[in-house]
Image (cartoon, helix red, strand yellow):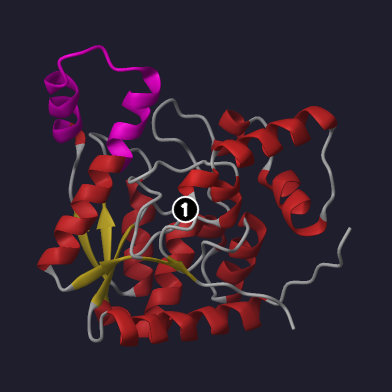
């Protein structure tokens, strides 16, 4: 097992500098556009963007699918950061698309339609507001393919793509985000289950395996290894910040 340390302050400041430099090269004076769920990933990404670009250049997009019981988290996060917010309800669009398919879609297809519609909304807003779309997936999710290709897995740049869940949380605390945004359980938005319920293991166990080589029980290790192997094709599609301790 390798030694492991993580300095949230150092990592956050390096990432902020990277974001600033990325925009200088890939969209000087452009705005950053991202979906806001109120969870740790979008909250931390938004906070990093505000630090790097200023709140006036960050646009948070709220995209409920019909009624969303926890939409208040998203609104509050935008208010706390002082960023502009736009709300687009994707409910009718998703239902119309399902009805227009002309075939019986699989469960996986139905699961992936909403995040792909949301990404369409983000790019529509970005193109109309001189924007670049921020990907908000973290390393832990990407490691096991827990992202929709061309949905939440898309974007123009990825500030937290190489940080694990535990590291994202540490950065969020360093940036001073209220704890409820750091520890909000990530839900799939469909059946009310958490990500960890669907995966069948905890992010803590996954992160320890990724960073420290601490192997979980054999059944869990085999599942993680299989998911990682099957989902390699989803990775490395856009510029991502890479951070290592010196």
Q: Residue furthest right?
A: 1
Q: Quadrant of residue 123?
A: bottom left
Residue at numbered disc 1: 39
Q: Is residue 68 left or right of residue 238?
A: left
Q: Left of 211 or right of it: where is 85?
A: left
Q: Residue 153's spot in the image, x, y percent? A: 40, 50
How far from the left and from the top, in percent, is residue 100? 12, 22
**Which residue does the image show at 16% across and 28% down from the upper left?**
97
The image shows residue 231, relative to residue 212, as above or below, that is: above
Is residue 113 magenta-colored? yes
Q: Residues within 10 Å of mark 1 (few under 14, many from 20)?
A: some
Is residue 225 found inside the magenta-colored segment of the image?
no
Q: Main structural element of the magenta stretch: helix, strand or loop?
A: helix
Given residues 38 and 41, the one toward you in this image is: 41
Quarter of the picture holding the N terminus: bottom right
Residue visible at 52% across and 78% down? 15
User: Picture quarter containing residue 168?
Assistant: bottom right
How many marks overall? 1
Q: Residue 144: x percent and y percent?
A: 59, 42
Task: Locate the C terminus and report the quarter of the image it occupies.
Answer: bottom right
Q: Of helix, strand and loop, which one carries label 1?
A: loop
Q: Which residues are magenta?
A: 92-115
């Amino acid at each position: 097992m390798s030694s492991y340390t993580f300095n949230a302050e150092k990592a956050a400041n390096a990432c902020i500098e990277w974001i600033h430099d990325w925009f200088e090269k890939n969209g000087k004076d452009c705005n950053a556009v991202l979906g806001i769920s109120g969870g740790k990933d979008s909250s931390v990404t938004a906070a990093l963007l505000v630090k790097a670009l200023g709140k006036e250049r960050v646009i948070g997009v709220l995209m409920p699918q019909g009624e969303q019981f926890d939409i208040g988290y998203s609104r509050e996060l935008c208010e706390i950061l002082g960023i502009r917010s736009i709300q687009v309800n994707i409910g009718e669009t998703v239902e119309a698309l399902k009805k227009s398919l002309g075939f019986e879609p699989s469960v996986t297809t139905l699961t992936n339609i909403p995040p792909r519609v949301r990404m369409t909304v983000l790019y529509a807003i970005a193109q109309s507001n001189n924007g670049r779309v921020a990907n908000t997936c973290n390393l832990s999710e990407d490691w096991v393919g827990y992202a929709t290709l061309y949905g939440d897995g898309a974007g123009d740049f990825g500030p937290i793509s190489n940080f694990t869940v535990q590291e994202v949380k540490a950065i969020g605390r360093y940036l001073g985000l209220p704890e409820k945004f750091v520890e909000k359980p990530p839900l799939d938005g469909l059946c009310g289950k958490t990500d960890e319920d669907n995966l069948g293991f905890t992010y803590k166990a996954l992160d320890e395996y990724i960073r420290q080589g601490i192997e979980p029980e054999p059944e869990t290790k085999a599942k993680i290894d299989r998911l990682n192997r099957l989902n390699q094709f989803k990775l490395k599609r856009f510029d991502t910040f890479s951070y290592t301790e010196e």
